[in-house]
Structures are given as structure tokens and as C-alpha cells.
Image (tube, rainbow, N blue to C red):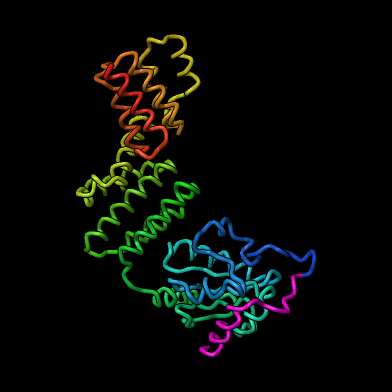
Amino acid sequence: FRSQMAWVRAISSTPSVGQLPPPPGAPGAGAPGGGGAAAGGGGKSPWVVEVTEKTFANEVMKSDVPVILDCYADWCGPCKQLTPILEEIAAKAGGALKLAKLNTDNNPQLAQGLNVRSLPTVIGIFQGKMIDSFVGMAPPEKLQEFVKNVLGAGAGTPGPEDNESLLAEAARLLDEDGDAANAVALYQRVLEDDGKESAVVEARARAVAGIVRCALATGDEAARDAYVRELETTYSSFRSLPEVAQAMAAAALAGEVGAGGDIAALRSKVEADAADLEAHYELAAALFAAKQHEAAIDEALALIKKDRKWNDDAGRLLLLKIFEVLGNKHPAVAGGRRRLASIVLV
């Protein structure tokens, strides 16, 4: 296999020649990832990639984590059964390994270099070396042993820099893609690092805070409360970290406002009786629960303007919690703070 991998390095660093496109009208023609067509949402995982002869070197040979190489073809029935299973394994591994899918019909030179003679062929690769392989639909015990061998090749304690990458990618998945499931998988990967160094412990605290935010995004109250307790006990010394403070404030506020009230009904109450300060408060809380943050800030400010001291300063306290949850970088917070100051200082 060593000589095969050397040959693969050579062809994957040069443009492919003589490559024929799939025949017109063929299933999956022109679309990558045909072998994983049956998988639900597998393409959303950051740890599942489609590779070609041009991208193989970077995605597989130079990968920082072990790679499961899934060699498939669109016409291969067993491939369509196996690929979704491999995609699920990669997603659940949370960054401990990567699945690279190779369409052998579209990349014949690479398939030849890897000595792929039957489909599906699955190869474990790390640092340019083969770890293990199998052909066909492996029974569960064989697949489990294969994955264990692949993971073992990259075993080691992730350091602070690795944790930072995982935390950053998890935050991006949650905040930009709204992908709480894959974000949780990455946060869990950070929690698996049981190092005692302060930077590692801090990373675990931030990961727990991230899982709290994921639970808030999905409405999982049980998980939210369980991980908040973890922050309050195991990681109490990190409560001043921005991520931790923000997650705990968001959880506390969510616990107070719950799912929120009927926004339309509350607006009608406020319009019918502008002096109904309880209705103003409930409307601000309902708007926040509905993620209408700017409107929630407006309503809380309206309440404070009418009566700063109502219900033991409830309006101002609600507004400050909203600011803490959103964070100072949120575009509505700076303006909201200025408007609050103009009210309380006049």
C-alpha cells in the first residue's frame, strides 16, 4: 500500500487527464456525493467532504485527523446503504475523524491508484498511511473494529489550540448556520479533553456554556437546566467569562419568560390601556422569547420611560438582562444602552 499511496500523491497533485463525465441522464450525473444520496442532511456536517483527484491531497493525505475514505459509485446499491452509516459515524465523532467520499467513476485514476477493484471499498488513512480497510457491507462488529482502529490512529489529547478551533467552529455552526446538533457534537469533543491545564479546563467551561446555548436554541429545557447546574458547580470559577456569563444570563431569562405570551394579544392590551405596565413588561418578555430582540428592547424602554421604579425596577432589570444575553457586540445593545441612559439620567 505504501507504493500505491506514493503514486496517489503524485496524481492528486496534478490535473487529471482522460476523465470521462458520467453519461447524460445517469442517476446523480453532475452531482457530487451520489453514494450518500440516502443520507438525511449528511452534507451539513463539517466532517463529511466529497473529494476528487485535485482535492485528495489536501483533504485526505494532509488531514489533521484520521480519514475514512468511502469509495463509491452512483450505480452501486450497497454503497447507498453504507454511505449514510459512515456519514452518521463522522457526524457523531465530532471532529475526531473525517469522512471523505470518492466517486470512483468520476476519478478513475485515483481509484486505480488506490487499487479499488470492488465497491464499496472503505479505507482508513492517517498521515498518508493506510490504517485499515474493508470491502462490501461490513457486519456491525467489523465496522465497529474498523472505526476503533481509525480513531486509535489519531488518538491523543487535544491541546488548547485544537480546543479553540473546535469552539470556534461550534459557535459558527450555531450562530451562523443554526445547526445546534453538529455544534453540540463539537462541544462534546472539547469536553472529552480531561487535561488539568487551566486553558483546557477553561475550554471545557466554554463548551458547557455553548451546550447551554444549543439547548436554548432547540428548546430543550432539561438539557439547559442540567448544563447550567454544571456551570454553577464544576465551573463556578469561570462565571465571569463572557461566554459563560452570557449563557447563564440567557438561561435565567428564558426560565423567567418561558415561551412568552401571545404577542398580538399583549399588543392589544397595551394599545387599549397604555398605563397597564404589567402588559408592557409581559410584551417585552414575549418579544424577547420570540427572538424579536430590538422590539423587546423598545418595549422595555417604553416601560421604563413610563415608570422607572415600577415593580422594584423590573423594567430596567429586564432590559439589563437582555443586554447581557445579547452581548455588547449586538448592534441593538449600544443604542439601547444610550437610550436607557438618556431616560434614567434626565
The relative height of residue 131 versus residue 46 in the rendered view (above or below) is below
Q: Residue furthest bottom?
A: 3
Q: Which residues are magenta?
A: 1-22
Quadrant containing the C terminus in the rendered view: top left
What is the x, y in percent for residue 89?
48, 65
Residue 123 placement, left or right of 245 = right
In the rendered structure, the answer to whether residue 31 lies left or right of residue 4 reads right
Which of 49 and 182 lies nearest the eye of the viewer? Answer: 49
Does residue 202 lie above or below 145 as drawn?
above
Residue 254 lies in quadrant: top left
Quadrant of the image occupied by residue 69? bottom right
> Which sits in the foreground, 281 or 56?
56
Viewer-proximal residue, 293 or 248?
Answer: 293
Query: Residue visible at 57% across and 59% down?
Result: 43
Rendered position, 258 above or below 5: above
> Measured from the top left, where is residue 77 in percent x and y?
67, 70
Q: 94 or 330, which is in the foreground? A: 330
Q: Residue furthest left?
A: 237
Image coordinates for residue 300, horizontal then vertical, percent: 37, 23
Decide whether residue 125 is among the magenta residues. Answer: no
Residue 173 vertical position relative to residue 284 in the rendered view, above or below = below
Q: Is residue 208 left or right of residue 220?
A: left
- Residue with the most extreme right position: 24
Q: Is residue 9 magenta?
A: yes
Q: Residue at 71% across / 64% down in the picture?
A: 30
- Residue 273 lies in what quarter of the image? top left
Q: Residue at x 31, y 48 (%)?
A: 227
How many numbered circles are shown?
Answer: 0
Q: Residue at x 79, y 64 (%)?
A: 25
Q: Classify residue 121 as left or right of residue 187.
A: right
Q: Where residue 335 appears, x then y in whole percent?
A: 38, 29
